[in-house]
Image (tube, rainbow, N blue to C red):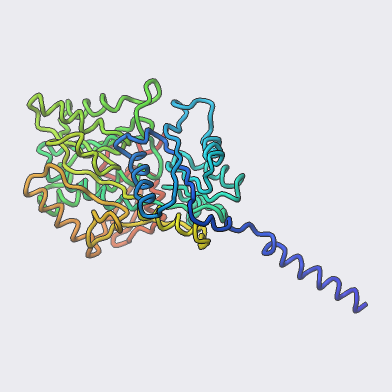
Amino acid sequence: MRKTYKIVLLLLIAAIAAPALFAQSAPPATGPNLTVGLVMVGPYNDHGWSQAHYDGLQYTLAKIPGTKLVYIDKANSADRPGTTVSQLGESLVAQGAKLVIFSSDDMADEAVKFAQAHKDIFVIFASGDTTWKDGKNYKDLPNMVCFMGKMEYMKMVAGVAAAMTTKTGKIGFLGPLINDETRRLAASAYLGAKYAWVNYLKKDPAKLEFKVTWIGFWFNIPGFTSDPTQVADDFFNSGFDVVISGIDTTEAVTEAAKFQAQGKKVWAIPYDYAKAIDEGKGVSLGVPYFNWGPAYVANINTAIKGTWKSHFEWNGPDWKNINNPDTSAVGFMKGTLAPEASTAVDKFVAELAKGLNLWKGPLNLQSGTEYLKKGQVATDQQIWYLPQLLQGMTGQSVAK
């Protein structure tokens, strides 16, 4: 009888230990001379989102000698019909990649599919929340890391620049597709504009118009999206004299330059890429941009050294210098700003550095539903998963 109990006890111990014994672990260290694969949703030289990632990897190559980059751009259904993003990742593995980066929120499902199928390959999902244990989409993937920059801060700065510049009180936001990310970034720009309008200019918030128009994707795909050139023109032709871009390409500033050449006083703010302001010299008020290099260096080094651990990062600016290329995940490069507007931008950045939080109640959603009670500070989850635009903004909140 005692022998039977002993056998049962051993079986119970084995059953309890089995998950730990057979749990998936991170791939082994790659060692030096790592080949990194990068999948980009748009052209590598789009002067926007994809180029910011591409340049972030060029920074990484310089910081980690021996590292090699192979990449595929234009990873979208219009440019590559019939080919999935996970298949593109596999083609990079065939070229020797031991770490593959999926660099767009649009790739979420395919990045997960790839990571599950290739447990021996390190995976970075830039802008995703898959490895955020407190997020809605968490999956236990030891070979995956997710990170995103806290662009909310820099979109607020863009909103301040817009509010301090507009002469009509009408600010347009040129949006891509509608999802959690794009809602919270458009709302951040609005919060910054409203703050400057009320606190710096001492104007009635009801006199500020902030309209969002979505094109349907991150950049123009003829026959599938609305034409961002036409959307920008519609804004400028209807009294909106500042357009803040949320898309990956630079139509907002190129159209603003065209209108200014016709004698109209209009301005724009591009997005994603620090040098995007060069597309509209004289009309670009500045650009909120991502600096992916430091996060890539830090995480790729863990794959090389064998210290990789699945986790999620939401990386903020270096408040000592938001444009420090080695330390700040997001920044704002000032463009053509009037002295008063430039001073206001600097003042606002200093206030943010000291703890100013615009994601604080009272705030309502666009529908009028209470979002944050008076004095309530939004959690990271409430910001990340913003369900609607905010009250005071016009435009569509949910994709049809």
Q: Which of 361 and 68 is in front in this view?
A: 68
* Residue 194, above or below 83: below
Q: Is residue 22 left or right of residue 208?
A: right
* Residue 279, above or below 356: above
Query: Could you tell me which residue is drawn at 76 percent across and 70 percent down?
Result: 13
Query: Could you tell me which residue is drawn at 31 percent across and 48 percent down?
Result: 290
Query: Could you tell me which residue is drawn at 50 percent across and 54 percent down?
Result: 131
Tell how many labels.
Answer: 0
* Residue 182, above or below 353: above
Q: Image quarter for residue 5? A: bottom right
Which x, y percent locates residue 183? 35, 43
Q: Nearer the viewer, residue 349 or 121?
A: 121
Q: Which of 102 and 296 is in front in this view?
A: 296
Q: Image quarter for residue 27? A: bottom right
Quarter that holds the C terminus: top left
Which x, y percent locates residue 251? 25, 30
Query: Could you tell me which residue is drawn at 60 percent across and 50 percent down?
Result: 119
Which x, y percent locates residue 292? 35, 50
Which x, y percent locates residue 171? 19, 38
Residue 197 visible in image: yes
Residue 395 visible in image: no
